[in-house]
Amino acid sequence: MFIFILTYQKPLEEVEKHLQEHRIYLDTNYQAGHFIASGRQEPRIGGVILCRAESKEKAQEILVQDPFFIHQIAKYDVIEFLPAKYAEGFDRYINI
């Protein structure tokens, strides 16, 4: 499992221009089973995506398809995360 932390590198006006494309990217990856949760940071300086992928390379392949990445809207920090404890039912998101 991976945590993508996005930090905007451009003004919010530029973020807004690519937001619809970014939402389509999110929807596509939810449907593919890659994304578990996502949302913006508060204050609005970026976002967070919880990603299921079998390797860091696969997570990177998913990340570079984001319009925010393509248009250099955001900088990405990728954190590999190995859940040791979690709420009942969450295990369905861990196993790939």
Image (cartoon, grey):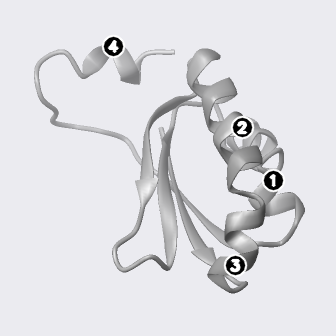
How far apart, in angstroms, are the residues tagged by discs 4 and 2? Answer: 22 Å
Say which residue label 1 marks. Answer: 67
N-terminal-most mark, 4 or 1? 1
Report which quarter residue 89 is drawn in. Answer: top left
Q: Are marks 4 and 1 in contact (CB under 8 Å)?
A: no
- Is there a contact, CB below 8 Å, between mark 2 and mark 3? no
Q: Which mark is residue 13?
A: 3
* Above/below status of 46 relative to 70: below
Tag 2: amino acid: Tyr
**Could you tell me how far apart the alpha carbons at marks 4 and 1 are, in whole angstroms?**
28 Å
Disc 4 target residue? 92
Q: Secondary structure at mark 2?
A: helix
Name the one closer to the observer, 61 or 55.
61
Q: 3 or 10, which is in the foreground?
A: 10
Task: Compute the Cα span from label 4 to label 3.
Answer: 38 Å
The answer to whether mark 1 and mark 2 are in CB contact below 8 A is yes
Q: CA distance from mark 2 to mark 3?
A: 19 Å
Q: Position of residue 86 (x, y in %)?
A: 16, 33
Q: Which residue is mark 2?
A: 25
First of labels 2, 3 by sequence position:
3
Residue 46 lies, with reference to residue 68, above or below; the image says below
Classify residue 92 as left or right of residue 65. left
Which residue is most to the left? 88
Residue depicted at 36% across the width and 80% down the height: 43
Q: Amino acid at mark 3?
A: Glu
User: Quadrant of residue 87 in the image?
Assistant: top left
Q: Nearer the viewer, residue 32 or 18?
A: 18
What is the x, y in percent for residue 29? Answer: 64, 28
